[in-house]
Image (cartoon, rainbow, N blue to C red):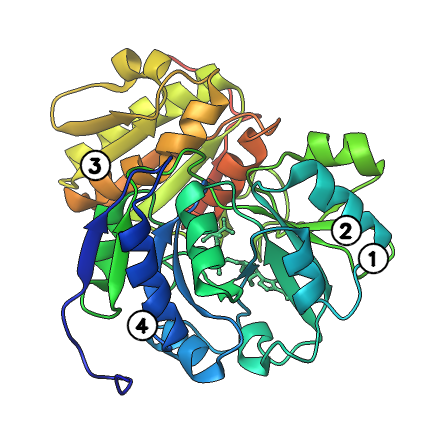
Amino acid sequence: MLSGSQMRSTVVLRVDPEQPDRQAIERAAAVIRRGGLVAFPTETVYGLGADALNPEAVARIFEAKGRPAHDPIIVHVADADGLAGVAREVPAVAGRLAEMFWPGPLTLVVPKAQAVPAVVTAGGETVAVRCPAHNVALALIRAAGTPIAAPSANRFGHTSPTAAQHVLEDLDGRFELLLDGGPTPVGVESTVLDLTGRVPTILRPGGVTREALEAVLGRVAVLERLPEGETSPRSPGLLDRHYAPRATLWLFTGPRERVVAAIRREARRARGGGRRVAALVADEDVEEVAGEGILVSSVGPGHDVAGVARRLFAVLRSLDAQHPDLILARDFPREGLGLAVHDRLVRAAGRIIDVTAECSEGD
Ligand code: TXA
Ligand code: MG
């Protein structure tokens, strides 16, 4: 097998996302079985996978991504039986959720089985497990005959990949094989739900909505990752950056009209100061924000939250590729998939500006 730092070229195989070619899947499964790394599409984002039961193979994922060893990795299984194979025990509620939401973008955190190596769980006693709703991912797991540990297939801290090209931009040459199944349909990562405490807790909002989980579970807690230093809604907070573009991103939150007016104003101010400015907005905002020398990109109509989620990361990447100094982004309502969109924007932001209390003023 490859020694860690060795580089060689990544093989790319195009596959039909609905009915992937058997030979391509077999070839990828063979890479997994011999301890190699395969990037593959799921319904959320592309993953960078390894045999979850092979600690050396999993260690290579951390190295390829530049991911710190204290960050545990999700194990992908083909069905609820796969969950039983990696969990020490399957809480009744986990069985029920798996039945309702799998295959689908819901990751369940449960007590880990002995068979799961410590490197997967970052030494912890719990394991995060999900069954992806994507025929390429499912075929790969089945053909490999082993659960597959896979984080998003991007350099650590960078925006998650929703297309094969994004994976290559970040990781080309750092893994053996890429299954290119086209763009991923959901576009934001899975919801991570911790079932090991007294109340089921969403650790990361994602493709399965909080509302859908509450309809089944009743009360669901959401882990609040309030930015350090953010004390009042008016004071802009400084944040740890994750899911982040290279450019500095400022997130404007509050009523839409004020948000758009503030972005328009700030864009002109920054451009006047000689900075290269980009704006990430919805279709209905484009006209108001547009102006000479301002790169404006839309994530689609603001009411189509599934579309916004699907396009968000690709738009961030394409803006970033134009090397702006500053990206001004609008926030989206936190209902349904909007909660995940909001969460990713917050984590991408270097600064959050709440314009709720701002006086409206002419430009
Ligand atoms: O949609 C997804 O979840 C994608 C696709 C590829 O499946 N995967 C993904 O993986 O987003 P990653 O590693 O980028 O994000 C997984 C998140 C991390 O924040 C990690 O800390 C958390 O899940 N996680 C993993 N195992 C955990 C555990 N045992 N307890 C708590 N959090 C865990
Ligand atoms: Mg990730």
Give the answer, above or below, for where 323 lies relative to 66: above
Say which mark, if any, is on residue 91.
1
**Depth-wise, is mark 4 or mark 3 nearer the camera?**
4
**Depth-wise, is mark 4 or mark 2 nearer the camera?**
2
Instruction: Name the residue that disc number 3 marks.
Output: 277
Sequence-wise first label, 3 or 1: 1
Say which mark, if any, is on residue 333.
none
Q: Between marks 4 and 3, how big is the CA–CA gap?
A: 32 Å
Check disc 4 and report its element: helix, strand or loop. Answer: helix
Q: Between marks 2 and 1, how big is the CA–CA gap?
A: 5 Å
Question: Nearest the camera: 140 or 342?
Answer: 140
Q: For the view shown, which residue lies furthest in the bottom direction? A: 3
Q: Between marks 4 and 2, how big is the CA–CA gap?
A: 32 Å
Instruction: Name the residue that disc number 4 marks.
Output: 64
Asked if the residue under mark 1 is in contact with the one under mark 2, i.e. CB atoms within 8 Å, the reply is: yes
Quadrant that contains the C terminus: top left
Residue 196: image quadrant is bottom right
Quick one: label 2, few (<14), some, or many (20+) residues within 10 Å?
many
Q: Between marks 3 and 1, how big is the CA–CA gap?
A: 50 Å
Instruction: Name the residue that disc number 2 marks.
Output: 94
